Amino acid sequence: MNINQIMLAGTALEARGSGALHWPEERLLAVSDLHLGKSERIARNGGGFLPPYETTDTLARLDAEIAATSPRTVVCLGDSFDDMAAADGLTDAATEWVTRMMAGRRWVWIEGNHDPGPVDLGGTHLAELPLAPLTFRHIARPGASGEVSGHYHPKASVRARGRTVSRPCFLYDRDRLVLPAFGTYTGGLRCTAPALQTLMRAEARAVLTGPRPTTIPMPRVTA
């Protein structure tokens, strides 16, 4: 089973092996940091060439999660595009794919630091989405409660069959839940990074993504 249950603010949520979050009671699916168009943006800015397949792969995995969960609402938690030019540069095929996934459901684009403005793809554009008892936003805020966010692209490592496996992960404690990046070409920030060590409570746990999501205590820096 590729689902681990997380309780946040008395709400039962499902951390899925893909990196998507499902709220069954609300029939809501949330994903973060798709970073569509990343390879195009890197090439446009004179960087190295990456095979331009990440948009197709990311959309295919999102489409599969929508088919599996049949959500009424899809929330994209910011940085859905690598920048606004990448949003404008979507191919006709990718635009039609997104439009088809949006049909018949509420689709919310949360503003991120890479894509702060609206994109001409329909849906609703919000700085954050309050849906009691939870609030969905891109970047976690100190002191928040019942918060679901992204931005940090957390990843963690675990020993399995004599080797160390590193994977994107969910992080959660009693106050907040941070989603992994869903985009195919997105990197990751280790849980031992100071920003995540400071953000998460001492009892925080990590759910590593993959065919069998694994829950472990959030790795900590030891003296």
Image: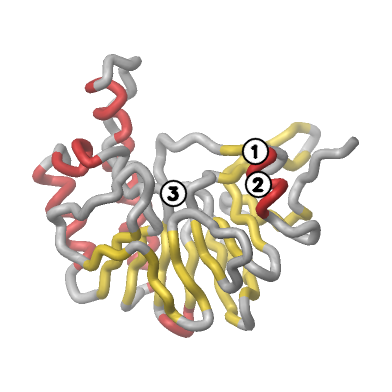
The kind of residue tagged 2 is Leu
Q: Residue at x 20, y 55 (%)?
A: 118
Separation (CA) of disc 2 from disc 3:
18 Å
Q: Residue at x 39, y 66 (%)?
A: 128
**Display colour scheme:** secondary structure
Residue 134 vertical placement versus 109 (above, below): below
Q: Residue most toward the right? A: 223
Please state if 128 lies on the left or on the right of 199 as rendered. left
The kind of residue tagged 1 is Arg
Q: Residue most toward the front? A: 143
Q: Rate crowding at label 3 as few (under 14), some (14 to 19) or many (20 or more) other CA atoms within 10 Å.
A: many
Q: Which residue is mark 1?
A: 190
| Badge nearest the viewer, 1 or 2 | 2
Dot 1 or dot 2: first in sequence order is: 1
Q: In terms of secondary structure, where does tag 1 sit?
A: strand
Q: Rate crowding at label 2 as few (under 14), some (14 to 19) or many (20 or more) other CA atoms within 10 Å.
A: some
| Badge nearest the viewer, 1 or 3 | 1
User: Do labels 1 and 2 touch, CB within 8 Å?
Assistant: yes
The kind of residue tagged 3 is Phe
User: Do labels 1 and 3 touch, CB within 8 Å?
Assistant: no
Q: Which residue is mark 2?
A: 196
Residue 5: x percent and y percent?
63, 71
Q: Residue at x 29, y 49 (%)?
A: 116
Quarter of the figure with the C terminus: top right
Residue 141: x percent and y percent?
55, 59
Q: Which residue is mark 3?
A: 182
Separation (CA) of disc 1 from disc 3:
16 Å
Please tell me in which quadrant of the rendered image residue 42 appears.
Answer: top left
Q: In terms of secondary structure, where does tag 3 sit?
A: loop
Q: Residue at x 76, y 45 (%)?
A: 219
Please state if 219 lies on the left or on the right of 39 as rendered. right
Q: Is residue 18 visible?
A: no
